[in-house]
Amino acid sequence: MHEQYQPREIEAAAQSHWDAQKSFVVSEQPGKETFYCLSMFPYPSGKLHMGHVRNYTIGDVISRYQRMLGKNVLQPMGWDAFGMPAENAAMKNNVAPAKWTYENIAYMKTQLKSLGLAIDWTREVTTCKPDYYRWEQWLFTRLFEKGVIYRKNGTVNWDPVDQTVLANEQVIDGRGWRSGAVIEKREIPMYYFKITAYAEELLSSLDDLDGWPEQVKTMQRNWIGKSRGMEVSFPYDVASIGSAGKLNVFTTRPDTLMGATYVAVAAEHPLATLAAQGNPELQAFIDECKSGSVAEADVATQEKRGMPTPLFVEHPLTGDKLPVWVANYVLMHYGDGAVMAVPAHDERDFEFASKYQLPIKAVVRTSAGDEVGSEWQAAYGEHGTLINSGEFDGLDFVGAFDAIEVALLKKHLGKSRTQFRLRDWGISRQRYWGCPIPIVHCESCGDVPVPEDQLPVVLPEDVVPDGAGSPLARMPEFYECSCPQCGAPAKRETDTMDTFVESSWYFARYASPHYTGGMVDPAAANHWLPVDQYIGGIEHAILHLLYARFFHKLMRDEGLLSSDEPFKNLLTQGMVVAETYYRVLENGGKDWFNPADVEIERDAKGKVIAAKLASDGLPVEIGGTEKMSKSKNNGVDPQAMIDAYGADTCRLFMMFASPPDMSCEWSDAGIEGANRFLRRVWRLAHGHVGKGLPAALDTASLSDVQKDVRRAIHQAIRQATQDIGQHHKFNTAIAQVMTLMNVLEKAAQDSAQDRALLQEGLETVALLLAPITPHISHELWQELGHEDVIIDAAWPAVDDSALVQDNLTLVVQVNGKLRGQIDMPASASREEIEAAARVNENVLRFTEGLSIRKVIVVPGKLVNIVAN
RNA sequence: GCCCCGAUGGUGAAAUUGGUAAACACAGCAGACUUAAAAUCUGCCGACCGCAAGGUCUUGCCGGUUCGAUUCCGGCUCGGGGCACCA
């Protein structure tokens, strides 16, 4: 055993052993319990970032721990390889997205391997390869025929200068990021997944996901947004329009119907279009509403504006004339693109009505009273007893809901309805680097799905996009084809699919990644699925996880697999953040400096007081900790850290810095500390092994001091097992091992028994660290005299007899304040504990002159004496 | 704007069910070893008062429940994630 800890050699040796033995290649083994551990696959952006290192280390710790519990563990990896960054890189460097992507994959794969992850690389999946996406196209055609996919118009960001559709991310302050042109909303035909048909199930089966964080389930429930309300129809004023009709709205507050004072429609609503005929002013307003991005955050934060139309509708119950307004806060795609406005009981309506002097009529008695003042109060939105509502006066919410429904039904002007906030999933993208949509447009046959024997529709890989629309739409060799049904000349669809589609089913493909007979081999899929543990960033809490759940149900309904949900347990990891440093430029912008180039100045207590740039010695501003990003230039390159300290040190630091679901702050000093700890472990083991391996431990004849050491060993096992196995709190598990190391380093090494105890201690350290720092543990295990390898060793078991303690220290409080401690035999009764506490010197001092009202004894913990 | 989450020493954090706030580290300070440096080891380390024993205060802010609140409840402030074409 080498005297120094040499991570480079140790890690290379361990990794080549695993490679040679194919240690992490798994196959279905009937009868052996499976554990499918999956980390969200990366987008091959160029090189690994710290978020990847964190994600994959967490997954690896769980995988290796489960393997030590004796399970058949599957941990696969792949590449979410389609997406916009490849097109951007292509435009910047004049290189084809395919080439750029494949090169990135090759490099990032070497990086992942250097982390020593227990991955079955034979199952690698790359979503931009035809053998993957052909099954996505196959499913598309099946779903299209079933009607689960359909075509309708959708709204997109249109850049009028570049003549192209932009992603929300590419719209900055309402303008195109490259052209600077004001963005317009434009309607184009798209394909949609009918996810709303699964809304009810996506909602209800959340209740069965016990292994998911409550927070994520809440977000999904709110996103799906099931609400019970009323569909209400407002008949048009025939005379003023020259045609009759009904304006339909949906409301969750039909009890406030008698307080509706106007109705508002979205700019895209047919009624708005109708009203704008021969009304240039209104038309101008509608056009203005069409500028800006389609992102809801932009729409919802813009100033609420509106314009009256000359139109009126009739109140369905009173027959009163209500004016029709066009308002920019009404969303066309939610409900019916129109709302009934009750300014007295809805904050947005209140704001709008106040701005445009529309009437406000209170119809609910709230905790704020019967009146509505000039300032909005939260109480106005409460449920309460109806007032000013004619025959409905005095009814509560439920009573009014029912009575108003009866009244509306009688007039055929409304009925109760369940509404979802969830919208169908539009997947058409006018982009090149994505999976082609397998549809052929034929003049006589319409939209024809590409037959199975003609799949895949292969994406040409030698194309360099230029940012002006989709290149496929300009490639006759791609789009010219004949109709699969009638054989006439036809045009292939040139849109590609949303990249969320690929990431919605990759977890199933890993079960049978090379299967050529279908999307998945049902036997393999059912063997491995559902995923036992899924790990990824919290930023995916809604969209990706909802789409993957949806796809799983689609595949189930195709008969491809039998489970209802894809991910049994979910762990959402926090972000990796780091300090930022900048200087303000003359133009007011900021110049960001990488932490690696900045020197820190501290005061006597170690508090950071200033920072300067190493290269010029001049001060820089400290910008606070933020998510590692290119824009803030605060990224720390994991490769540099692995090269300098080794993978084990990086993994240990990452797992120790904070629990996985919290954000994790990068610290150069912290990684030094992690490295120091591994060197300490190595040094202790080296000293121990150098003296020859000891004989077996005789647990029956331990001295009190030796019992203390052994208790420390088994306390560490107990705690670390709980922390890793149950709570995924790797930071406290590591702290336990550190505490154990502190004990072992101080323990005697004189007698054979001492040395046997140290052997047990060091084996425990190696085993408890094995999932976290697998390379050093691999090496230590051999040095400690084991023939087998540590990845196949069993996780250590707690010897309860080692934990027994004869005496306990209890805390004594007076009125909840700590006043002393008493040592008591573990067997002491309540009465004995209370008696001992009462005569404690400090307790007597603080209870002098007071009478004791109550004594609370918490066994094994404390005594609280209540006195006054 | 809407939904979700978070806030504890100089720093990262810990605290089974409401029961000793600050475990384990990092940084810092003092010392040992060394010709020196590195490495390593030992001690101190929330704030304030005190020679000390000890005391008072302290978990973003305000209030409540409780013998006892970092933990539960109500109301704020600030920070983060998501908002359907970033992945």
Image (cartoon, coloured by chain):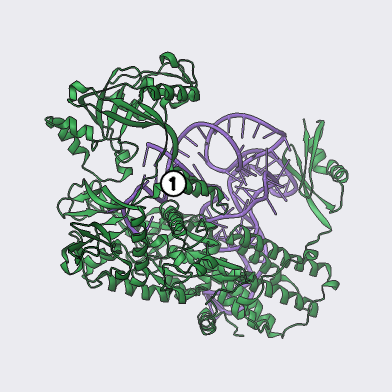
Position of A630 relative to A838 (above/below)? below
Q: Quadrant of the N terminus of chain A?
A: bottom right
- Residue A699 falls in which quadrant of the image? bottom right
In the foreground, A588 or A264: A264
- Residue A698 falls in which quadrant of the image? bottom right
Q: Residue at x 32, y 39 (%)?
A: A300
Residue A455 coordinates in the image, percent (x, y): 31, 69
Q: Quadrant of the C terminus of chain A?
A: top right
B51 relative to A175 in the view: left or right = right
**Residue A44 appears in the rendering:** no
Mark 1 — on which chain does it sit? A
Residue most toward the front? A486
Residue A743 coordinates in the image, percent (x, y): 70, 68
Which chain is drawn using purple? B
Q: Residues within 10 Å of mark 1 (few under 14, many from 20)?
A: many
Q: Amino acid at mark 1?
A: Ala
B11 relative to A388 in the view: left or right = right
- Residue A495 falls in which quadrant of the image? bottom left
In the foreground, A43 or A193: A193
Residue A50 coordinates in the image, percent (x, y): 43, 64
Residue A758 coordinates in the image, percent (x, y): 73, 75
Which chain is drawn using green? A
- Secondary structure beneath dot 1 equals helix
Number of callouts: 1
A682 relative to A289 in the view: left or right = right
In the foreground, A243 or A419: A243
**Residue A596 appears in the rendering:** yes
Residue of label 1: A199
Position of B67 relative to A8 (above/below)? above
